[in-house]
Image (spheres, rainbow, N blue to C red):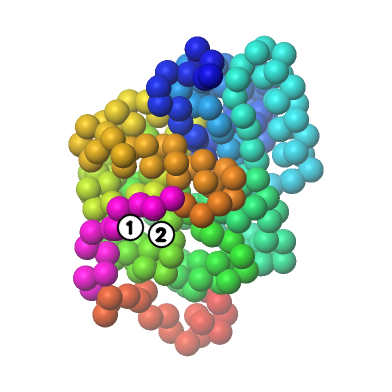
Amino acid sequence: MRPQWYPEPAMVDIHHHLLPGLDDGSPDLSTSLDMARMAVADGITHVVCTPHASHHWTYDPTLVSAKLEELRSALAAESIPLTLASGCDFHLSSTNVDDAFQNPTKYTVNHKSYLLVELPDVILQGGIRETLHNLRVSGMTPILTHPERNLTLQKNTERLASWMRGGLHVQVTAGSVLGKMGREAERMAHELLADRWVHFLATDAHNTTSRPPQMRKAFDLVAKKYGADYADALCNRNPAAVFAGEALPHNPPPLHLFEDEEEDSEPKRPLWRKLLNI
């Protein structure tokens, strides 16, 4: 029987900066507990803690593990029924990618197969499609976080379509669905949802105010506009499979994804860029 904390339906959040003091998310344990209470009150039952792994924020698995256990103990002491897993917000730098090839489960959710991948906000480097392919070959399943917030993809989704045709999964931020990340992010989020290009909703929570750990309103809006079954897949069934390291349940086929396969390529890079891998 589900505790009274949880309104129906339960939700799983795979992108959440809950661990204290590791990045620009929760600054301390007290804030983490406040975020956890807010998440549980909203109906979130499981959270993947995803600190940044970037040139600015060093990802230290030993420290992440220690922070995770500290937070689990604090949640138990406060009787907050939230189940945690580790992961990271993996930036596609050459250093990160090379390390992931050598250590395929270092950055993945629950040290299994799924990897949350974050792009730069504005400029997209070349060779992303090849990198995503090589990550899959190495045993990881990339999930692209919040493409609707990328200024380049907002102008043209063909590169996203190309990556998806290669097997990429997509996660949209709940706040984007509600218009809290700007008009263009909201527009693109709903275009992706209408075409069934989205596999997950997640909070990308950083605090209890501007970036709160809430999905309920986004779930309800998706259910109203695109169907309750699709909303449940995005907020429950699919992220639960990621949490467990299992294959995603059956999803409705995406619309308009394979209509222009002859354009399934990124802009060609000059030979000197390929040789320097830039």
Rounded to the nearest angstrom, the CA distance separating label 2 from label 1 is: 7 Å
- Residue at x 66% of width, y 22% of height: 28
Q: Find out whether the residues at labels 2 and 1 contact each other: C-beta distance under 8 Å.
A: yes
Q: Nearer the viewer, residue 258 or 92?
A: 258
- Residue at x 23% of width, y 73% of height: 260
Q: Which residues are magenta?
A: 249-260
What residue sits right under mark 1 in the picture? 152
Q: Quadrant of residue 23?
A: top right
Horizontal arrangement in the rendering, residue 217 relative to residue 49 (left or right): left
Q: Earlier in the sequence, mark 2 or mark 1?
A: 2
Horizontal arrangement in the rendering, residue 96 relative to residue 272 (left or right): right
The residue lying furthest to the front in this view is: 1
Q: Is residue 225 above or below residue 207?
A: below
Which amino acid type is marked by label 2?
A: Ile
Which amino acid type is marked by label 1?
A: Thr
Residue 215 visible? The answer is: yes
Q: Quadrant of residue 257?
A: bottom left
Secondary structure beneath dot 2 equals loop
What residue sits right under mark 2 in the picture? 123
- Residue at x 53% of width, y 19% of height: 1
Q: Nearer the viewer, residue 248 or 93?
A: 248
Secondary structure beneath dot 1 equals helix
Residue 24 visible? The answer is: no
Is residue 259 in the magenta section? Answer: yes
The location of residue 91, given as percent across then percent down, is: 55, 54
The location of residue 15, given as percent across then percent down, is: 51, 39
